[in-house]
Image (spheres, coloured by chain):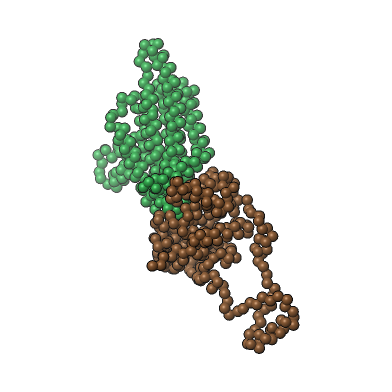
Chain colours: A green, B brown
Amino acid sequence: MKAACHRSLWIARITFLEAIRQRFFAFLFILGAALVLASGAVRVFDFGHSELKFLADFGFGGLFLFGSILGVVMTAQLFFAEIDNRTALTLLAKPLSRAEFLAGKFLGIWAVLGVFVLVLAALLAAMLGWRAAELAQLAAERRLAPPECDLAGLALYAALQWLRLGVVVAMVLAVAAAARTFLFAVVVGALAVLAGQLQWLSQELLLKPAEPGLGHAALWLLTHLLPNLQQFNLGDALVLAPHQVTAGTLPWVFLSGVAYVVAFLVLATFLFRRREI
Amino acid sequence: MTAAPAIEVRHLTKDFRIGLKGVKLRAVDDLSLSIPRGQVYGLLGPNGCGKSTTLKVVLGLVPATAGEVSILGLPSATAEARARTGFLPEAPYFHKFLSGRELVRYCAHLSGVPSDRVEAAVEEAVALVDLREAAGRLVGTYSKGMLQRIGLAQAIVHDPELVILDEPTAGVDPVGAAAIGRIIEAMRARGKTVVLCSHLLGQVEQVCDRVAIMDKGRLVLEGAVEEVLERRDRHVLTVDALTPAALAAAEAALVAHGARLGAVTHPRRSLEELFRELVTGSRDA
């Protein structure tokens, strides 16, 4: 077990080094950071929402959108780079199991996404902290209650987003393990992420009374197979209204996230098991 | 009790399904082979004859359609069998952002070299392939010959008992190919079994103890190099200072004994021998 972890960590290390050298990563990383920083300049266009909510939404959007794109494209790209360049041939001829290889790939990509989330969350925290302090001072002058902004909640939100991206990476790895081409893996992976994001809709539909039939069965299958990626989006509740999060919510979201990661990695290993390299 | 062969292949068949209709293509057809330990074994054949597929099945990279394969007495698909095997694939590609030394270190960790032995094992492997000076350079800057040699280093860093080399001299100039030949001989001297797939038949003849020739997925010939090449029905006499009179007398003597002189020619050296003679000492870098 120790040896298996050691080998997976070496795969993760090289995957991490490969990923951070990619121009695509640098491009989305800079774009995401620029979006968060630009939110301070365009906060006048807050469309009637509170200013802090506007700033937070910008940051949450950047994390969500660019994180998802990175998670899908980078996972498929790094997986197929090993297959197409035939480096997998050299690696898998060593006493390295396919499960260890996939675990290493997952950890390496997830670590890169961790850096992405950490930096964007730190920038967002700086923006929110700076503006919240200014607004608190203004509120004090007017003898009003200061706006709510919980930076510890932001750290929790960042951790949840990292976990959500972990589910995305594991899901795309499972798709890539069965796919023949990079493009197929990206398209199907992106569709799976989109379906996961909308999974709550099928949950709601399932709750409505309906005749048992093929449609109902398909809905049931969709609800139970796809992860509910929307459940990780607790940004508003954690940062701007911390008292709204119930006690059991976070452990449940955390545990279901971990369970989905494990389940998709097991599926990826099963699909990759007999793939011809 | 005799030790199990380095590789034992029994009735191996491998089919690939191609195209949308899943048309069956038989790459290896009922192949049986036994590769003894401690020898250099040449696996030869034209492109597409099933050599690389056979090696991939041996290494567990491709599942067999039928048949059994074992490495050193162990089922070939097990991690334990692979831990005792080193592999250099055809036209190897390595992560360009790693230096040669980093690449070999990475492979040493994946191959199960104990952490306190890794640095010594890396230096030993790099020295054996004569890349000590260039080991700090990025792999992306290596020539083809150097890539093959660093590929060899990653294959042998964990001191495997069996080393499988798929076209190790492809795209390498004759000097580089000769250097790889010397490394193979050094491995044989250390008691390793080397399986060599190559189109450089001259080199195969020089370094291999046994050869197997495949065609269209089937084994067409197998045996010790000396045995398969020797023509026991013909003889060669090498004579110095042969005059026309001596030649006529020799021919008459042969006829008198019921033999026939087939041809009289001057011995030739190979172009490779001439090339190596002229550029001795130079290396590809």
Q: Is residue A247 visible?
A: yes
Q: Nearer the viewer, residue A40 or A88?
A: A88
Corner quadrant of residue B46 = bottom right
Q: Nearer the viewer, residue A273 or B276?
A: B276
Residue B250 % position (x, y): 69, 83
User: At 52% from the left edge and 40% from the top edge, which residue is drawn?
Assistant: A22
User: At 46% from the left edge and 66% from the top edge, which residue is drawn?
Assistant: B36
Residue B239 % position (x, y): 69, 76
User: At 38% from the left edge and 67% from the top edge, which residue is drawn?
Assistant: B1
Q: Is residue B164 visible?
A: no
Q: Is residue B42 left or right of residue B273?
A: left
Residue B167 % position (x, y): 54, 59
Q: How many marks?
A: 0
Most extreme residue toward the bottom is B256
Q: Nearer the viewer, residue A213 or B40?
A: B40
User: At 41% from the left edge and 30% from the top edge, which residue is drawn?
Assistant: A60
Relative height, residue A156 to residue B144 (above, below): above
Q: Is residue B242 left or right of residue A90?
A: right
